[in-house]
Amino acid sequence: MLSTPGLVRRWTAGALAAVAVCTAVFGERVAAAAGPTPPAAFGVLAASLSQDGRRLSWTVTLDHDFSGGAFRRGRRTLCLWLERRSPGAMTGRLCVLPPARRGRTLRLTFARVTARGPGRARVVAATITRGGRDELTASLIPTDFDPGYRALRWQVRSTVAGGACAAPAVAAVAPCSIAFPARPALARLHTPVLVGCVASGRSLVFGGSQHRHEIALTFDDGPWGTPPSIDFVNLLARYHVPATFFEIGSQISRYDPTGAIERRMLADGDMIGDHTWTHPDMLTLPPAAQTAQLRLTADAIRRATGFTPCLWRPPYGAISPRLDSLARGLGFLTIYWNVDTRDWSLPGVASIERTALSNASNGAIVLMHFGGGPRYETYAALPTIITALRSRGYRFVNVAQLLGLRMIYR
C-alpha cells in the first residue's frame, strides 16, 4: 500500500478516551440514554486512509469482530465521513453494510451529505478484504462517488442506534457514538497518472474469461485522419465504452503530433497497444528488426503520453512461437482476437454490425479498425453494436481489464 506523508495516520485504543461520549460530531448531536446500559458502539483501535494508484484504501481495526450479525444487533453502524479540505465542508460518508440476504460479503454504501444531513445511500463498487476477524480493508475508486482527486479530511464514526441510545440524550454509561480520530485527519490525494501495465498470464491471447459477461472492442492501424481518431475517442466516451487502440508508431507524429488524442484515450479509460512501427509482416523480418519495430513504437507512445504499453498486436495476424517469445521478453502480451468484423474490406455498415453481434460471446475480443483506410463505416456501425451488446447485458472493458492486468500509476 502506498502512502504519502500525512496521508495515513494510526492511533492506538488509548486515543478513544479523548472522545467525549454523546458529543456533536460533524454538527450532529449523538444521543445517549439513562437507565439500562445500552450496547456500546464498537471501539476503533486503528484506522488509515491511503491512495494506491487510482484507488483509495480504507483500513479499520475494531475491538470486535466484523460480522453481519454484529452490526444488525443494536443497529450498529461503521462509517467513514469525508469532508473537503476546509473544515466543515462535508462531502459524504461511506458506510459498511451487512451482507445482502443470503450473501456473505460485507458491502459499502455512499451517501452524499449536505447541511440537511445524509442523502439516500447507494451501494458502491468496492473490494472488501479481511486482514483478520477484527480488521477490514475497503478498496475503491473515489471518482465512483465523488468527482476528482481532491484533498479530503476523514474520520471514522462507530455508532449504535438501538436500545437506550434511541432515547432522548441524558447521561450515559456506554458510548452511543465514537469518533476516530478525535479530529478529522487530512488525506492529500493526487490525480493518478497511468505510466504502464504489467504483462502476466499466457503470452498469446485470443480472448478473456468465458465465465464473465464482458467484451472488448479493439481498433487497429491508427492514429488516422478519415475520420479523425478523436472522433472515435469522443464517440466511445459518449457511450461510456472503454476500448483498446493498437497504434502504428510512424503515424503518431503525423496524426497526433502533440499526443493530445492519446492522452485523452488514457484519461477516458482506454488502453493503447503497440502495432509496430511500419505495419510489416513481422515473420519476414530478422529478430533485430522485429525488436526495433516494437521498441520504436513503444518509445513513440511513451513520448506522447508517458505511458509504456504492455500489449501488442501482430500486423495481419502473422505470429510464430519464436516471435511470441521475443515479444514477451520485451514485456508484451500478444493480443489476437476471436471476432473479426472484416471492416478493413469496407463490407458496409450493416455487415460490420451483423458480424460483430452474431459472433459476440463472453470474453470476446472484437477486431475493428480506426486507421489504414477510410473508416466511416466502422464509425457508423459502432452505436448499433454498442447499444445491442449492452442490451444483452455485456460489460465493455479494455483488453487490460479483460485480462485482469496490473496497471502502474504515479
Image: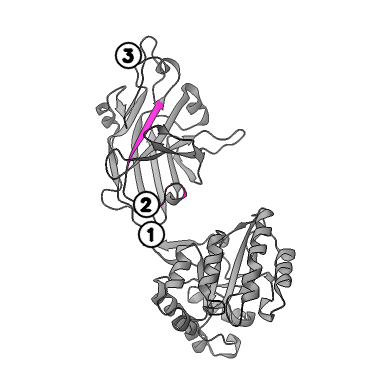
Magenta region, residue range: 144-159
- Name the element at disc 1: loop
Looking at the rendered structure, the kind of residue marked 1 is: Pro
The reply to whether residue 338 is visible in this rendering is yes
C-beta proximity under 8 Å, tags 2 and 1: yes
- Name the element at disc 3: loop
- The residue closer to the viewer here, 371 or 323, is 371
Image check: 217 left or right of 76? right
- In the rendered image, which quarter is residue 314 located in? bottom right
- When the figure is inspected, residue 21 is found, relative to residue 104, above or below; the finding is above
- The residue closer to the viewer here, 247 or 26, is 26
Q: Quadrant of the C terminus?
A: bottom left
Q: Earlier in the sequence, mark 2 or mark 3?
A: 2
Q: Position of residue 170 (x, y in %)?
A: 32, 14
- In the rendered image, which quarter is residue 2 located in? bottom left
Q: Residues within 10 Å of mark 2 (few under 14, many from 20)?
A: many
- When the figure is inspected, residue 171 is found, relative to residue 370, above or below; the finding is above
Disc 3 to disc 1, C-alpha distance: 48 Å
C-beta proximity under 8 Å, tags 2 and 3: no
Which mark, residue 192? 1
Which mark, residue 51? 2
Looking at the rendered structure, the kind of residue marked 3 is: Val
Q: Earlier in the sequence, mark 3 or mark 1?
A: 3
- Name the element at disc 2: strand
Image check: 227 left or right of 50? right
Disc 2 to disc 1, C-alpha distance: 9 Å
- When the figure is inspected, residue 171 is found, relative to residue 9, above or below; the finding is above
Q: Which residue is mark 3?
A: 170
Is residue 155 found inside the magenta-colored segment of the image?
A: yes
Q: Position of residue 208 (x, y in %)?
A: 62, 62
Disc 2 to disc 3, C-alpha distance: 40 Å
Q: Earlier in the sequence, mark 2 or mark 1?
A: 2
